[in-house]
Amino acid sequence: MFSSISRRAVAALAIFSVLFGAGCTKGPDAATVAASQPKTLTIWAVNDDMDVYGKILTDYQTAHPHVTIEYRKFRLEDYEEKLVNAMAEDRGPDVFMIHNTWVGKYMPRITPMPAATKMVYKFSSGGMTNKTETLELRNEKSVTLRELRDQFPDVVAKDMVRRINTAKPYTQPVYEDKVFGLPMSVDTLALYVNKDMLNAAGIPTVPDTWDRFQATVSRLVKVDENGKITQAGAALGTARNIDRAVDIVSVLMMQNGTQMVSDDGNPTFAMMPEALSATRQDLPSVQALGFYLDFANPQKEIYTWNKDMPNSLDAFVEGRLAYFFGYAYDLPLIKARAPKLNLTIAKLPQIQGNPTVNFANYWAWTVSKKSKNSDIAWNLINYMAKAENEKLYVDAAKRPAAHKSLIEAQLEDEQLAVFASQILTAQSWYRGADPEAAEEALLQLVETAPNLEADMLLHELTLTQQKVQQTMIAQ
């Protein structure tokens, strides 16, 4: 009887003979043979079915037949709980998705992208009767930091690059910038509009500034005999019944000149930016928050929303809301729930005279620190994120592109043009190791602020900044 070691040796010899022919005088080296052994990569994704990646993954496996890919899609509501539990039990994926605000949270669980990866390619030569297959181990360069900054919107490098200590334990620290994820799409916050409501109110064009936006809102509000709002102009001013309320408040602050975080990632939104200190007395973040809250203030002319209203997306698809702030990912759901809605999508309003600022919301692919195949995993992500492969994905999934080279073509796409047009001016902000706690602190601020005088509002804003600071745990 053969021992288990002998059986493995015989099996390896059989594979070697098939690949290279019994008469070959020179085969691949030991490193190439080892790298060519069968590997399985598990991929965990949110929302997208595997078919939108179908050709990309098929072509990759054709070039690397020793790699088997297992793809699992999860609902957003279930994804993170299952991911964290699986990682804790060492049964997590090799490749998984993180939201752009999760980088700080998942850094300890991620293997940063290496400068290069080693990958085996299989080649065939000869005819049908003397076909020979050979293997080649290549050292393939990953996306460099310069390429990331040149080829992707600025927000991607700001979100996905982190400076870490790469020195070995007990040696002098060496700090380097490393990439922690690559996206294949970057979504932006835009304005969904019920055209029938604007037509009925005699509003010929969608407002492109917040001043014009304010001027139209009161014309779109309808109330019943008891003063209850039956048709809202815009979903603004509250916390819990507005989709992505934190994103809306954040972008209003940023458009008004607020610096949400310092260069080292610490929150600064309760502070006066140095560039504005000579020209402003009121904090730009306080001004922006007050602007937002006025839409839910019954004493204001623009009163249009309150905490008793339904969820903003529900109100929009039910024909009870004229303006809804949402992302490209909302469009399929809106069309499915309200197929006859006379809908248009417009750019996010801006503050006239100020620099254009939009808001980014996206997912990126990354690699688990516990992956036994991290080189292959990062090689796959680099392959997926190539412009030509990203195009296959965004065309199939109907998503805004991440590569700058693909944006211009999407400007002609009726469904994606608005979202794509905002990508280059889109920003985000670092929310530390606990982004959910940071968001909750801002939601609580929105809920508390309407009952506060000006001095107490500033105090509450400072407390909120301190709460967010607590999420900035050193990685």
Image (cartoon, helix red, strand yellow):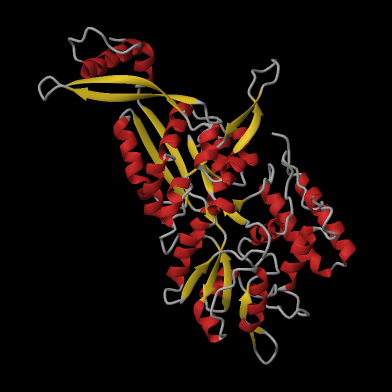
Picture coordinates of residue 401 (x, y %)? 46, 50
In the image, taking residue 381 as reference, residue 323 lies left or right, namely: right
* Residue at 70% from the left image edge and 72% from the top image edge: 307
Q: On screen, 131 above or below 146?
A: above
Picture coordinates of residue 437 (x, y %)? 71, 50
In the image, taking residue 473 as reference, residue 41 lies left or right, namely: left
Q: How many marks?
A: 0
Q: Quadrant of residue 398?
A: bottom left
In the image, taking residue 14 as reference, residue 474 lies left or right, namely: right
Q: Does any portion of residue 368 appear in the rendered image? A: no
Quarter of the image that includes the C terminus: top right
Residue in front for this viewpoint, 380 or 71: 380
Residue in front for this viewpoint, 225 or 114: 114
> From this viewpoint, which residue is outermost toward the bottom?
225
Residue in front for this viewpoint, 436 or 143: 143
Picture coordinates of residue 152 (x, y %)? 51, 43
Q: Does any portion of residue 168 appear in the rendered image? A: yes
Quarter of the image that includes the N terminus: top left
